[in-house]
Amino acid sequence: MLKLLVIPAAALLLAAPALAAPGDPPAPAPTTDRPSRGNAGIMRYDTNKDGVVDRAEWKAGQEARFKRLDTNNDGKLTEAELFARTPAVGNSVLPSDRQVERQSAYFQRLDTNKDGVVTLEEFMAQADRNFARCDVNKDGKTDTAECRQALQRTRQ
């Protein structure tokens, strides 16, 4: 009996594209907040597409990121807002204990006045430190290779 159902189901799946009415527009590609692989990492902030991210592009990108994270638009980030989009490890829905510890430590580092929220000023101070660390040659610009070099030096 099961075999009798499998064959028509498979035929229906294979014929589904042909059953679409002619002239139906193709379904739009799903949209995401994440950049494509070609526009990932630091280079997603290269708005003029010159192959480098300068300090102004970085600053504008980080300010926009803060606004996206500030879901209640109060000008402050809670720990929940800051990490709401952080994926869990593996197939888990919840972050691992190690992730929670690291996120908490990072939030505490950002929250310099220890009031339990991160303001734009606090967020941008860390963003400035991150840019300075990636700008290895201190020319006011960075790219993926230079930032990767900086991160490798930090790990040594």
Image (spheres, helix red, strand yellow):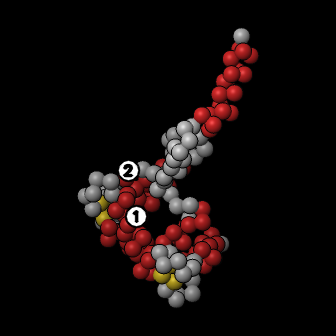
Residue at image point 37% right, 57% down: 69
Label 2 secondary element? helix
User: In the image, 80: left or right of 146?
Assistant: left
Q: For the residue marked with disc 2, what is the amino acid? A: Ala
Q: In the rendered image of this protein, does residue 26 appear above or below residue 36?
A: above
The x, y position of residue 16, in whole percent, is: 62, 34
- As drawn, which residue projects farthest toward the left? 74
For marks 1 and 2, give the CA distance: 15 Å
The x, y position of residue 117, in whole percent, is: 31, 58
Binning the other alpha carbons within 10 Å of mark 2 as few (below 14), some (14 to 19) or many (20 upward) gives few
Label 1 secondary element? helix
Residue at image point 37% right, 59% down: 68
The residue identified by callout 1 is: 65
Q: For the residue marked with disc 1, what is the amino acid? A: Arg
State which quadrant residue 113 falls in: bottom left
| Mark identifier at residue 80 | 2
User: In the image, 86: left or right of 14?
Assistant: left
Query: Considering only order in the chain, which callout, 2 or 1, is on the residue closer to the N terminus?
Result: 1
Binning the other alpha carbons within 10 Å of mark 1 as few (below 14), some (14 to 19) or many (20 upward) gives few
Residue at image point 41% right, 69% down: 62
The x, y position of residue 94, in whole percent, is: 50, 41
